[in-house]
Amino acid sequence: MILVFQVVLHQWIFFLEKFFPKVYRKEISVKPSDDQYCKFDSQTLTLFTSSLYLAALLSSMTASRITRGLGRRMTMMFGGLFFAIGAVINGFAENVLTLIIGRVLLGFGIGFANQSVPIYLSEIAPFKYRGALNIMFQLSITIGILVANLLNYFTAKIEGGWGWRLSLGGAVVPGLVFFLGCFFLTDSPNSLLERDKFKEAKVQLQKIRGIDNVEEEFNDLAKASEAAKLVQNPWKEILTRKYRPQLIFAILIPLFQQLTGMNVFVFYASVLFKSMGFGNNASLMSALITSIVNFCATLVSIATVDKYGRRTLFLEGGLQMLLCQLVMTVSIASKFGTSGNPGELPLWFSMLVVIAMCVYIAGFAWSWGPLGWLVPSEIFPLEIRSAAQSITVAVNMIFTFCIAQVFTTMLCNLKFGLFIFFAVCVVGMSIFIYKFLPETKGVPIEEMTIVWKKHPRWSKYFVEKDSSFEMGKI
């Protein structure tokens, strides 16, 4: 199980009372007839939530150098260790400062893992199954979310109000499993070649492929490695013209992933489940059901990504999310209005909206969720791959941090209009994918430049080597 064991904080009464008393007082005093838009608008709670993303952003930059210099495996081990230490600190926390320190260390772990794991999976996977194997990363995240929600559900029932410590501290288990599991892994052949371990790289390639005759693939990897060694500063190199098409996607795909509107859907889930009779367990039950949907939909992505391609899943998922956002806009506007006072929601209404919500989450989970990590990890050549993945992680965390900072305020002010905002974003990102993303399924990772050269929009950034020009310079 990948270490991103997402312990979701579902407004446990004792947890909120101890660390966020203002939010606690709002939570116990808010009735269904009160304003549901603004009850969690707390900057302290937002800082606690956002500190993880900011730490992941900063650590991803450091992880790039470690990934290139010490290998993918070592970076993953650091990630697991940081995550385990952060979980222990959170489990024993007595004040908000300690909570934030622990969450920062969790962020370091996530930054290191998100930087190294997608690259590692893309490099060791056979190109015919690279999509499915890479999405195993996202599948492991969804398993972690599901297990965390199950743990939250049962620990919330513990008498005495200390169950939240088990939920937060329990994250040490996947952190240690991830750290110790790395001892049984070898680095990818690409990483070994990058560090001049030629014999070991060839042996590992033979083991991974299950055959002895890997000369053709090994020679391609070796050539790519030699080219990579000519690049002294990958951060400077990635800004050159010949990498501009890939760089655009490394920035925009994680940005778009955060603008799909998942946060607003998760927020309304707890309100709707409370109206369906789940009472104080509403937020826990809503998270449990949505995480099950998330897990099942990720399995669909694994089964289809290498058959139908990345573009098809992006576009189908975008259309599915857009339709559900329109349904949610009309539904929430009709019941919550601009006051945020829905009154007593009828059961049929809540069930209808929850179904639309689950369909939306499924659309995200088999498209923008996993593909937001898969595509950036497979489109860059070896010489700048680590730096590019750090950019992808950094952009993802920057905008996750920004959205976490402003989400409750936007919700409080835009109200149901927040659905319209994200719907417009989904339309824009789907058009962008349709016009500009080349299909990458079934393309060997070291030959990925070919698909960009053949694309009508991006071909102008590439020229063949001749006596006057170097590749990619005009």
Image: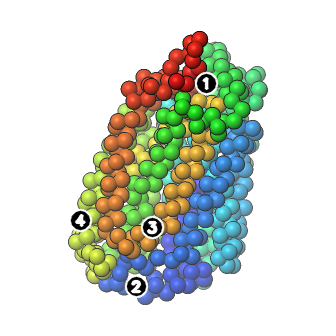
Q: Amino acid at mark 2?
A: Val
Residue located beneath label 4 in the image = 330
| Vertical relation: 3 (above or below) 434 | below
Could you tell me which residue is drawn at 51 percent across and 56 percent down? 399
Residue located beneath label 1 in the image = 209
| Residue at disc 3, secondary structure | helix
Q: Position of residue 335 (x, y in %)?
A: 25, 74
Residue located beneath label 2 in the image = 30
Horizontally, residue 388 falls left or right of residue 360, namely right
Q: Report which quarter residue 99 is drawn in.
A: bottom right
Q: Measure the C-alpha gap from mark 3 to mark 4.
A: 20 Å
Q: Are marks 4 and 2 in contact (CB under 8 Å)?
A: no
Could you tell me which residue is drawn at 68 percent across and 66 percent down? 102
Q: Measure the C-alpha gap from mark 1 to mark 2.
A: 59 Å
Residue located beneath label 3 in the image = 407
Q: Earlier in the sequence, mark 4 or mark 2?
A: 2
Q: Earlier in the sequence, mark 1 or mark 2?
A: 2
